[in-house]
Amino acid sequence: MKSDKDSGKGKFSIPDLLKLKHSAMMIIEKYIIPAFKYIYKSQALRYSPYIFSLAALYFSCQANNIAKESSEEERQISRQYFEPAVHLRANISSADGSRPHIILTNEGPVKATLLELRIYELRYDMNKHKIDYAVSKESWNHDSLNPHESRTFIMWGNWLKYEYYKGLSITEKRPIEHYILEAYLSYHRDSDLRFYQRRAFYFFDSDGHILKENDVLNNTVFSEVLAAARTSRLDSMLEETSTKLNTDILHSVPN
């Protein structure tokens, strides 16, 4: 059986509890209450709402700037995967009474810059089975084409007439089907100046009509000529025929 002394072991007596309470009150009165009074009377506390508002505004602006920079980086990256797509539509025949012309349209989502359009006269050598002659006839330079924007380029040379090539055909003893007109287009992507080029070919038949590539795809008369034109390299041909090179008209087209 436990004694009364043992049963009270580990417990505070009433005098001890009174001393502990007195000590706690002294700590509160001496340290905690003065600390709250100091904070309450502090000048900083009066302006704390303004300080917190300014801090919130600052962090909001910083977050907004970070979001803008991230968005701009995403746009720059996305632009690298978008390409200008400048399409070429030519009306070389003047049968409808209008001047022969070429229309360039940027059907892509980004701007095309530094456009150059040239018209070449090519001649096919049936013995060598290749294009052996290239002459630059007209050329245009244009600064830029925005998405879905078009520009029209008028051709003025008399060399577009059927009679011109009919005369050459007789003089050179070369079939008129072996004279080709090429529209060569080059341009760049505005964001990084990536280079693009397009080539389109036009032919004369014996009846004086000007035919597009699609018109001669299944025509045996033009099959070898078209294949040679598509695989020809203008840079090497122009170098070889430098004495024959004749740029009749150079156009500079403003925006």
Image: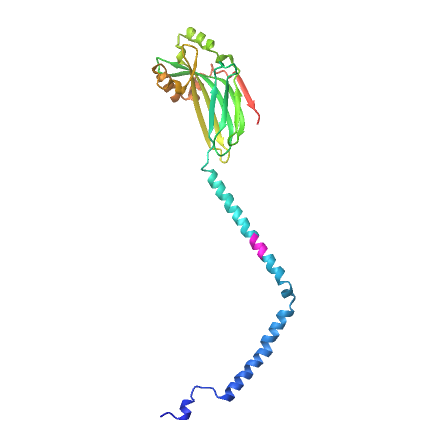
Q: Quadrant of residue 56?
A: bottom right
- Count of all numbered marks drawn on residues in the image: 0
Residue at 56 percent across and 55 percent down: it is: 59
Q: Position of residue 47 (x, y in %)?
A: 64, 62
The quarter of the rendered structure image containing the C terminus is top right
Q: Position of residue 122 (x, y in %)?
A: 43, 16
Looking at the image, is 126 positioned above or below residue 42? above
Task: Name the chief secondary structure element in magenta.
Answer: helix
Region rendered in magenta: 56-60
Q: Position of residue 168 (x, y in %)?
A: 44, 9
Residue at 39 percent across and 14 percent down: it is: 124
The quarter of the rendered structure image containing the N terminus is bottom left
Looking at the image, is 235 positioned above or below residue 10? above
Q: Quadrant of residue 252?
A: top right
Looking at the image, is 139 positioned above or below residue 208? below
In front: 35, or 98?
98
